[in-house]
Amino acid sequence: MQVVTGAMGSLLPKLGQLLMEEYNLQKNAKKGVESLVREMKSMHAALCKVAEVPRHQLDEQVKLWADEVRDLSYDIEDIVDKFIVRVEGPSKPAADGNKLTDLVEKMANLFNKGKARRQIASAIKEINKDVQEVANRRGRYTVDNILPKPTAVTTIDPRLRALYTEVTELVGIYGKRDQELLKLLALGDEDPSNKRPKIVSVVGFGGLGKTTLVRAVYDKIKGGFDSRAFVPIGQNPDMKKIFRDILIGLDKNTYTNINLMVLDEKQLIEEIRDFLHDKRYLVVIDDIWDGKLWGDIKLAFSNMNNLGSHLITTTRIFSVSIACCPSTHDSIYQMEPLSDSDSTRLFCKRIFSSESKCPSELKEVSIDILKKCGGVPLAILTIASVLTVGHQIKPKVEWQVLLDSIGRGLTEEASMEEMQRILSLSYYDLPFDLKTCLLYLCMYPEDHEIDKKDLIWKWICENFVQHGKHQTSIFEVGETFFNELINRYMIIPIFNGFREVKSCRVHDMVLDMIRSLSAEAKFLTILESNKDVTSSHRNIRRLSLQNTEEDQQAAPLINSMCISQVRSINVFPPAVTIMPAISSFGVLRVLDLC
């Protein structure tokens, strides 16, 4: 199943299943199904072409037609699924020996199945009318003839671990950048009369490598502190979780064995202050979006601590960095894009495994591409990934096509929009199945660690992954999808102690992009807070409840949603308190109470 093609991938096999003898459809109903299959196959082929074109490049009428077919496929699949369930019925316990009871049950089943067959025959007739109306409209529109690329079975690119391990080669942070940040952290330390906590805020737009830089500096200096913690925040933070994460980071052995869930914000703040009152600490609060939020977090860190402690924050918003650093004792470090030389090193390392191996025929076009990337590491990595297929480098003509499609270079005013445009190039370069698998990741909250195995099984349950060739198991196919998303820098791998990928995170810029694409395609609905809903309340197929507590606003919002067609629901604490009754979901496939 694809983002644009709706339920086509799973619907067509089910329609074929209806033609089997065991369903004993009436002759007219069978003809109706056969006609429906032919028309849906034709629509599917057209939608596959639409899916290859960036949505903003499509004619508005083509968008409307594609959306109509997608919604229609979902409705047809619901009807077919309900019919199959009614005919096959739930599994029955062994007969109890009462012949009269058994006979009554058999007669009831025959009646119900006969009724279901009559209903499906009538439904197929109505469906064919609707499909024909939609099909007639297709003739008035033109769809570009762009063919999809086949999915190759891959393993994790061996160059990837080196890039993540060798931070110097990844973004060129060692040298000028880390020395500048270290200098700001040490500024004023020569004054023994002023040892209160020093705050340094690192600011710059998404994809510049703020977190990578701060992590490198944190790892370099953490040994000089009694306690330390590195805590990611994100766009929709939970204050209690922030304070709990700080405590666990400061003393994992103590606070993982204490039930911190029972403490409120005031108690958590007091616990942090008490723990740190006689310690020199280093705490990083990563990715702050709101100055007021920092004011609340700062309550946990007393200015009375005179042991030379350090607080480091990162943010994309300059006004937030100012809010983080109200004193002249504090400092702001503005991240700049990579230099031309570092950009070239990063680009060549990703594509050629060597910073000086670029073939002469590609040097000129690579220079132009790097100019378009504007020194943003994330843009450079994603563009570099688009220019490779597996371990093979695409020909020069495709480099030129990519260069022409990027458009104008990054500017300060349009950096976020331009970054999404660059990232979307990588998205549209994905095979069909991977597009859907990637979009499914916006089911998770920002900065959430996504377990690899759980994610793959969800893809399988949603029919995003089909059985592979050469006796490859369906899970192995899903694992190939996961690895390919890592190779293309669409997800960030998280390794265990054996250097095996156990989970992943989605970069903020990628998450912004896929949420935008998901909302356009009505792929899933996200309820992030009691008044913040992404996507429509109607025809919800996938639902993610995030950071939402039960109150007077949340319950009516959930009750107003049309959830009878929901196929997949993920519920993240504390949103479990507003979880609708399971009986509300008639066609549910995936349920995860995270």
Image (spheres, grey):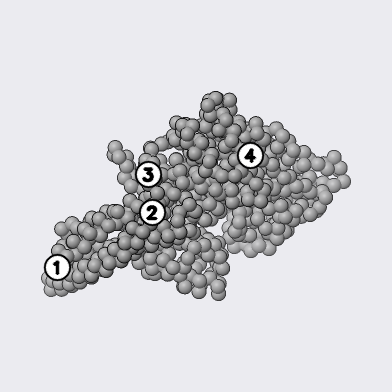
Residue at the image point whose x is 41% and y is 57% from the top:
62
48 lies left or right of 548: left
Work out how far the residue at label 3 is from the one at label 4, CA to CA, in angstroms.
Answer: 32 Å
Q: Say which label, 2 or 3, has the lower sequence index.
A: 2
Q: Quadrant of residue 67?
A: bottom left
Q: Are marks 1 and 2 in contact (CB under 8 Å)?
A: no
Label 4 secondary element = loop
Between 490 and 343, the one nearer to me in the picture: 343
279 lies left or right of 527: right
Q: Do the residues labelled 2 and 3 touch (CB within 8 Å)?
A: no
Residue at the spot of label 3: 147
Q: Nearer the viewer, mark 3 or mark 4?
A: 3
Work out how far the residue at label 2 is from the one at label 3, CA to CA, in angstroms.
Answer: 15 Å
Work out how far the residue at label 4 is from the one at label 1, CA to CA, in angstroms.
Answer: 78 Å
Residue 97 numbered mark, or none: 1
Q: Say which label, 2 or 4, has the lower sequence index.
A: 2
Residue at the spot of label 4: 375
Q: Nearer the viewer, mark 1 or mark 2?
A: 2
Work out how far the residue at label 1 is from the one at label 3, CA to CA, in angstroms.
Answer: 60 Å
Q: Which of marks 1 and 3 is in front?
A: 3
Label 1 secondary element = loop
Say what amino acid the circle numbered 2 marks. Thr
Asked if residue 45 is positioned above or below residue 75 in the image, the reply reads: above
Residue at the spot of label 2: 142
Residue at the image point whose x is 55% and y is 33% from the top:
365
Say what amino acid the circle numbered 3 marks. Leu
Residue at the image point whose x is 38% and y is 54% from the top:
142
Tell me residue 210's x, y (percent).
65, 44
Q: Nearer the viewer, mark 2 or mark 4?
A: 2
Residue 545 numbered mark, or none: none
**10 Å crowding of disc 3: few (<14), some (14-19), many (20+):** few
